[in-house]
């Protein structure tokens, strides 16, 4: 099967949209941009770095798009279109077919349209660029907009994906719930849209809760204090290992956000802490994110995580 046949059969699906006048098949796609703010995100998944070799192709297709939808959700954007750069070791039709099934099941669920891409031979890697929109006059959710006194909210579960990774690294089978969290993460697109006009700052949790809240704290020049008792309640088990997975485990694609001063976290999310004024530069090192109170096993986990932060590529 040639590259062109693969593209034609599996990617050039019925992807009509009134704003797409030239779809896949020409040298470039033609879209008419509306008078919206365009949010552009991109993410690459590389075999043996971002997923285990042998991961089911439909899971890879799902996840490659899910991680981009999660970034769009964290900006409060409505998904619109994406491009797909696929590097394959061989033109395996059955692999591509199953990959496309996972990819398009999620794409259809979120009404996002594949408008183009590139297909090359090489070590397995999937790179997606996606675009979403935010109406003019609405502020996208950014990392730098946390206000002192604002409550911190969480949507989605934490720690299950990291538990699946450590099980597989030890040659064990993760539970089906853990495997599902790692292989088929659910991007919080609706929640991101609901947070528009409600929250000020947001970030998705791809590298670990403390690391990603640290991004908000640093960008907003504030400190975030998490409530240890509340965190203990969302740990999958009441153990230090489970707390470490909750605080530093990557790959969860939950959403964290900050409410304006004086407003409660909505009841469909979990309140986990609050924003405090950042320390002036006195030379004293202060953690951007602290865990206050809570059980001993959680405190110990927080200490370990602060010493060895979440996932870093380099
Ligand atoms: P060119 O050689 O001009 O770059 P290609 O042969 O790479 O064109 O691609 C032909 C068409 O197929 C283009 O419209 C391109 O966007 C699309 N395409 C190629 N690979 C993919 C893919 N993996 N997913 C979606 N569209 C693709
Ligand atoms: Mg090309």
Image (cartoon, helix red, strand yellow):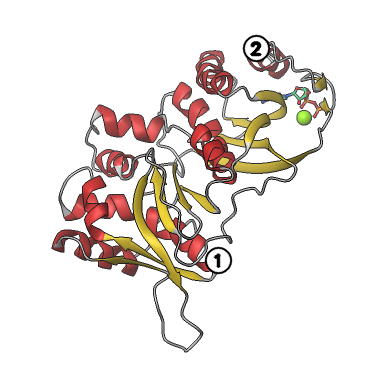
145 to the left or right of 234:
right
Name the residue at 41% across, 57% down: 151
Q: Secondary structure at mark 2?
A: loop
What distance separates the C-alpha of mark 2 from that of mark 1? Answer: 52 Å
Q: Is residue 296 left or right of residue 307?
A: left
Instruction: Find residue 220 and name its label.
Output: 1
Residue 299 shows up from this direction = yes
Q: Is residue 85 visible?
A: no
Who is closer to the viewer here, 62 or 50?
62
Q: Is residue 161 above or below residue 179?
A: below
Name the N-terminal-most of marks 2 and 1. 2
Percent from the top left, x then y, of residue 300?
20, 65
The percent position of residue 41, horizontal first and vertical second, equals 64, 43
Question: Which one is nearer the viewer's eye here, 286 or 277?
Answer: 277
User: Residue at image x 51%, y 60%?
Assistant: 216
Question: Which-is-in-front pick, marks 2 and 1?
Answer: 1
Residue at 27 percent of width and 53 percent of height: 231
Residue 145 located left or right of residue 182:
right
The answer to whether mark 2 is within 8 Å of ligand 1 is no
Q: In this image, 35 relative to 74: left or right?
A: right
For the residue pair 272 and 27, the one nearer the viewer reads as 272
Residue identified by numbered label 2:
1
């Amino acid at each position: 099967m040639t590259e062109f046949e693969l593209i034609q059969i599996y990617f050039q699906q019925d992807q009509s949209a009134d704003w797409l006048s030239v779809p896949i098949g020409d040298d470039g796609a033609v879209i008419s941009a509306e008078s919206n703010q365009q949010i552009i995100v991109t993410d690459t998944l590389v075999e043996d770095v971002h997923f285990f070799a042998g991961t089911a192709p439909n899971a890879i297709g799902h996840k490659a798009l899910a991680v981009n939808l999660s970034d769009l959700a964290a900006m409060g954007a409505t998904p619109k279109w994406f491009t797909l750069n696929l590097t394959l070791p061989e033109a395996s039709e059955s692999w591509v077919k199953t990959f496309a099934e996972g990819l398009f099941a999620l794409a259809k669920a979120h009404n996002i349209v594949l408008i183009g891409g590139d297909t090359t031979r090489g070590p397995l890697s999937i790179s997606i660029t996606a675009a979403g929109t935010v109406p003019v006059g609405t502020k996208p959710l950014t990392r730098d907009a946390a206000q002192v006194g604002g409550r911190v909210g969480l949507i989605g579960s934490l720690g299950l994906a990291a538990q699946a990774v450590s099980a597989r690294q030890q040659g064990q089978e993760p539970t089906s719930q853990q495997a599902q969290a790692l292989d088929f993460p659910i991007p919080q697109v609706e929640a991101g849209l609901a947070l528009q006009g409600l929250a000020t700052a947001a970030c998705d949790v791809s590298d670990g809760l403390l690391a990603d809240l640290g991004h908000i704290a640093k960008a907003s020049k504030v400190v975030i204090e998490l409530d240890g008792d509340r965190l203990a309640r969302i740990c999958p088990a009441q153990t230090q290992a489970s707390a470490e997975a909750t605080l530093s485990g990557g790959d969860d694609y939950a959403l964290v956000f900050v409410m304006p001063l004086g407003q409660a976290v909505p009841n469909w999310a979990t309140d986990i802490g609050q924003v405090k004024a950042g320390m002036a530069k006195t030379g004293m090192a202060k953690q951007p994110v602290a865990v206050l109170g809570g059980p001993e096993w959680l405190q110990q986990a927080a200490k370990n995580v602060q010493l060895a932060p979440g996932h870093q590529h380099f």
